[in-house]
Image: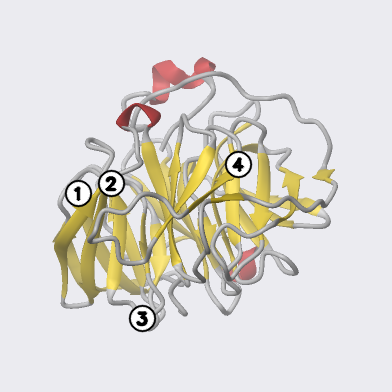
Amino acid sequence: MRLLTSVLCATVASTLLHGCAGSFAAPTSRAVQLRQERPRAAKKIPSSGIYISQFYGSEILGYPSKNKLHRLPLCNLRAGMYVNDVAVDGQGNLIVPSGASQNVVVYQGPEMCGKRLGAFHDPYGQPSDVASQDAANGKIAVGNIRDHGSSAGSLSICTLRAGCTSNLTNPKLNAAGGVAMSNGGDCWVDAMRHPAGGAALIYFKGCAGQGQVARGFRSKSYGGIDIDNQGNLAIVDQAASTVSIYGGCNPSCTRVGGPYRIKAKSFFGKLNAANTDFVAVDQTSGAVDFYSYSTKAIKFEYSFRRGLQIDLAPQGVAQNPRSAQ
């Protein structure tokens, strides 16, 4: 996870993955007019695959779902710089939060690298992770690693057409990391805990209100979140290089699997629709790591890095189609 505000570097650089770069862009308009834009594509584009973001790159890369052959990207999307994570919604639409513009862009699915449906501006802070059931028509939860003029982050609740209409905070939420939204419309943020550090999982019933700190959640540091087909939360502990699987967390958590050690230091990890694959990005080597997934084990299988550049800081990942939850 990367922060753009240089003002906060001294206090948070040791806990954010790579410190700070650049500065916040000034807010412009509440929403950006919808428009359509065809992506650049090399060949026939499949309806399934894996998206990878590179923080210092300007494109989101689309790869085959199974890339044991180390193929180059099948397609790419120009989506702006300073993208921490990307997400696919329940319809196969891709959601991209750009830290450079502080816009959140939605691309049409379920085919990979679809046309641009539109974008909206996040007026509250630096958008770093997103989640939605239907980004074209419904709510989009946007995690802001930090807010403007504040040392704490937040969760913005937005729609593609109306922009961000509410901003949710919690006293224990310092920096917002991974964000998840259930099919039932509840939200979670895996946050850097305030003020003591470590991680706190914040549960927002109905993606609204002040939120509650989840009991029974244990993690050394914050990380990414995904929801499996049993409704369990698969949560990455970036500092420990582990994934733990929790049931409930509304607000009481029960650990149903893990912590399972993963191969490398990763922040975000995502499940495929069948919940057989868990994919994460190794931030040290820039490789995409594939694991088998179940509540009983998460086991490394193989990696690829072709087409990625370590100096561009590969970081975010999304599988299309995503976990059905």
Q: x%, y% of residue 14?
A: 31, 25
Earlier residue among tags 1 and 4: 4
Please name the residue that numbered disc 3 is placed on: 274
Please name the residue that numbered disc 1 is placed on: 241
The three-letter code of the residue at mark 3 reads Ala
Q: Secondary structure at mark 2?
A: loop
Kindly report the distance in space between the C-alpha atoms of the residues bearing marks 2 and 3: 22 Å
Q: Secondary structure at mark 1?
A: loop
Answer above or below: position of 36 versus 47: above
Kindly report the distance in space between the C-alpha atoms of the residues bearing marks 1 and 3: 24 Å
Q: Residue at x 54, y 62 (%)?
A: 112
Earlier residue among tags 1 and 3: 1
Q: Is residue 250 left or right of residue 294?
A: right
Q: How dense is the environment of label 2, judged by Cα within 10 Å: few (below 14), some, or many (20 and up)?
A: many
Earlier residue among tags 4 and 3: 4
Kindly report the distance in space between the C-alpha atoms of the residues bearing marks 4 and 3: 28 Å
Earlier residue among tags 2 and 3: 2
Which image quarter: residue 301?
Answer: bottom left
109 or 99, nearer to the observer: 109
Instruction: State which mark lies toward you, 1 or 4.
Output: 4
317 or 75, nearer to the observer: 75
Please name the residue that numbered disc 4 is placed on: 79
261 or 204, nearer to the observer: 261
Q: Secondary structure at mark 4?
A: loop
Q: Is residue 282 visible?
A: yes
Q: Point out the residue furthest to the bottom here.
A: 230
The three-letter code of the residue at mark 4 reads Ala
Q: Quadrant of the N terminus?
A: top left
Q: Secondary structure at mark 3?
A: loop
Which label number is shown at residue 266? Answer: 2
Q: Residue at x 67, y 55 (%)?
A: 106
